[in-house]
Image (cartoon, rainbow, N blue to C red):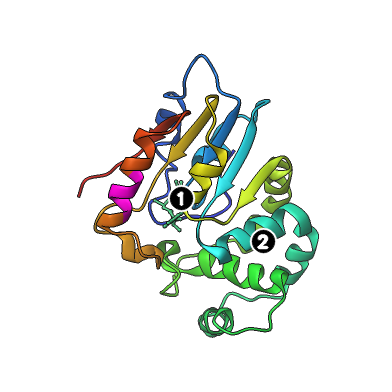
Amino acid sequence: MNSFIGWIGGKKLLRKAIIERFPVDGFNRYIEVFGGAGWVLFGKEPGKELEVFNDINSNLINLYRCIKYHSEELQKELNWLLVSREQFFDNKCQLEVRGLTDIQRAARYFYIIKVSFGSDHRSFGTNKRNLLTSIEYLHEVQERLKNVVIENKDFSNIIEVYDRPGALFYLDPPYHGTEKYYGYDFGIKQHVDLNTILKNINGRFILFYFIL
Ligand SMILES: C[S@@+](CC[C@H](N)C(=O)[O-])C[C@H]1O[C@@H](n2cnc3c(N)ncnc32)[C@H](O)[C@@H]1O
């Protein structure tokens, strides 16, 4: 199935090639460390293995959790939002302040991703879009997430917690030079740390790197 959002660096077009590289002798836990829009998770068939989805972005993970546990309430909240430039910038400001419930926050974040140009969260996109279809699709996403553990941790911590001999980690870190797009510090130090951690794990991994 498709993801429910676009994402900078999302692997919509590459997911098939990535999934083809999964070990043929199997694995009993699958951990997506740098989750984003989760194109590989949604592209893979759910099997018997434990599935874990992680990202450091707390607004994004709140959105996944609200879809998983409160899909109907989130859909109701979204039905009130109109597509307009003013609403887009109001939602962006509201995300910066306290006082929203998790569902209100998730609705605004979903709206910002859907309405922004190229899902960049920054600029109002002027393309025609059908928010209603996207909102209805959340039911299917909820179903897919039913048995997925959703985490909001730094990569080093999630790897340490879930590492076992039968684990398969899929890692799609911010590309060197594009880290600023995600709003989290991911520079040379983090790339070197990731390298060191992966050399010492008990499980296996698939790492996606893009050299600019
Ligand atoms: C290239 S994107 C992943 C795209 C994803 N594979 C997809 O198909 O949509 C990288 C992701 O890493 C997340 N990220 C950045 N720093 C992180 C960190 N220290 N730990 C975990 N996730 C992080 C970002 O929030 C972003 O969603």
Q: Residue 155 got which mark?
A: 1
Q: Which is more N-terminal, label 2 or label 1?
A: 2
In which quadrant of the rendered view does residue 79 lie?
Answer: bottom right
Label 2 element class: helix
Kind of residue at badge 2: Leu
Q: Is residue 25 above or below residue 89?
A: above
Question: How far from the left and from the top, in percent, is residue 117?
Answer: 42, 67
Q: Residue 35 got which mark?
A: none
Task: Report the residue marked by disc 2.
Answer: 132
Mark 1 Cα within 10 Å, few/some/many (few <14, many 20+)? many
In which quadrant of the rendered view does residue 171 lie?
Answer: top left
Spatial distance from mark 1 to mark 2, Cα to Cα? 34 Å
Q: Is residue 113 above or below residue 45?
A: below
| Residue segment shown in magenta | 190-194
| Viewer-nearest residue: 176 or 116 | 176
Question: How far from the left and from the top, in percent, is residue 5?
Answer: 54, 55
Label 1 element class: helix
Disc 1 residue lies near ligand 1 with CB under 8 A: yes
Q: Mark 1 and 2 residues: CB-CB less than 8 Å, in contact?
A: no
Give the left or right position of residue 171, taking residue 186 as reference. right
Give the left or right position of residue 111, taking residue 76 as reference. left
Q: Which of labels 1 and 2 is toward the front?
A: 1
* Residue 116 at least partly seen: yes
Q: Main secondary structure of the magenta part?
A: helix
**Residue found 75% across the figure and 57% down from its top:** 71
Query: If the image is split into quadrants, where does the N terminus sit?
Result: top right
Whether 121 is among the magenta residues is no
Kind of residue at badge 1: Phe
Give the left or right position of residue 207, taking residue 169 as reference. left
| Viewer-nearest residue: 155 or 81 | 155
Give the left or right position of residue 201, taking residue 211 as reference. right
Disc 2 residue lies near ligand 1 with CB under 8 A: no
